[in-house]
Amino acid sequence: MAHAERSIIIDRPIEAVFDHVADGNKNPQWRRHVMVACRISSQTGQGAIYRQLLRGPVGRPVAGDYRVTAFSPPHRLDFEVIAGPVRPTGSFRLTEARPGSTTIRFVLDLQPRDLARPASNRMIINQLRGDVAALTALKACLERR
């Protein structure tokens, strides 16, 4: 299994951080590889489905649609990618670091389809690490407000 995770403290209240992460339409604001994102289901919270176009190899768009699988504001949001060549599961866990500040932990896990290809596995792990590193951009985005 490929795994990546990162935690960061954001100087914003937990509700504000959770609301931003939970609104998949805002993913392009802090996840640089997300070109376009929009909710395509009428459902919000658990069960919501978001369509995403991701910047793939050589800048080509790649599907990365996902479904929210757990939704417990303002502490937990889990999702599974349901379209595209790489389909990890992920979670955001939020806790109040101190009044007005939030610790957010972003975890991605992927069960590769072909474990016999080490070069492919390294590429996937590097991609997951890059995805969780986007918390730095989330921090910058939210602390500007």
Image: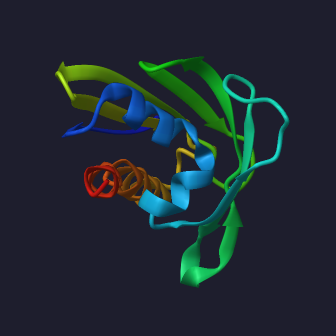
Horizontal side, residue 12 vs residue 21: left or right? left
x and y, in percent, of residue 12 in the image? 26, 37
* Image vertical order of residue 30 relative to residue 88, above or below: below
Q: Residue at x 50, y 19 (%)?
A: 73
Compare residues 101 and 81 and report the one nearer the observer: 101
Between 70 and 22, the one lying in front of the other is 22
Percent across and percent down for residue 63 are 72, 60
How many marks are shown on the rendered structure?
0
Q: Residue sitting at 71 percent across and 55 percent down?
A: 84
Relative horizontal placement of residue 87, taking residue 74 as reference (left or right): right
Res 98 → quadrant: top left
Is 40 left, or right, of 27 in this rendering? right
The location of residue 7, given as percent across then percent down, is: 24, 36
The front one of 114 and 111 is 111
Q: Residue 31 versus residue 143: which sits nearer the camera?
A: 143
Colour mapping: rainbow
On the picture, is 56 further left or further right than 93? right
Residue drawn at (85%, 35%) of the image: 42
The reply to whether residue 119 is visible in this rendering is: no
| Residue 67 drawn at (x, y percent) | 70, 35
Above or below, 62 against 15 in this view is below
What residue is drawn where x is 29% and y is 30%? Answer: 13
Residue that sits furthest to the top in the current view: 72
> Which residue extends farthest bottom?
58
- Say whether residue 19 is visible: yes
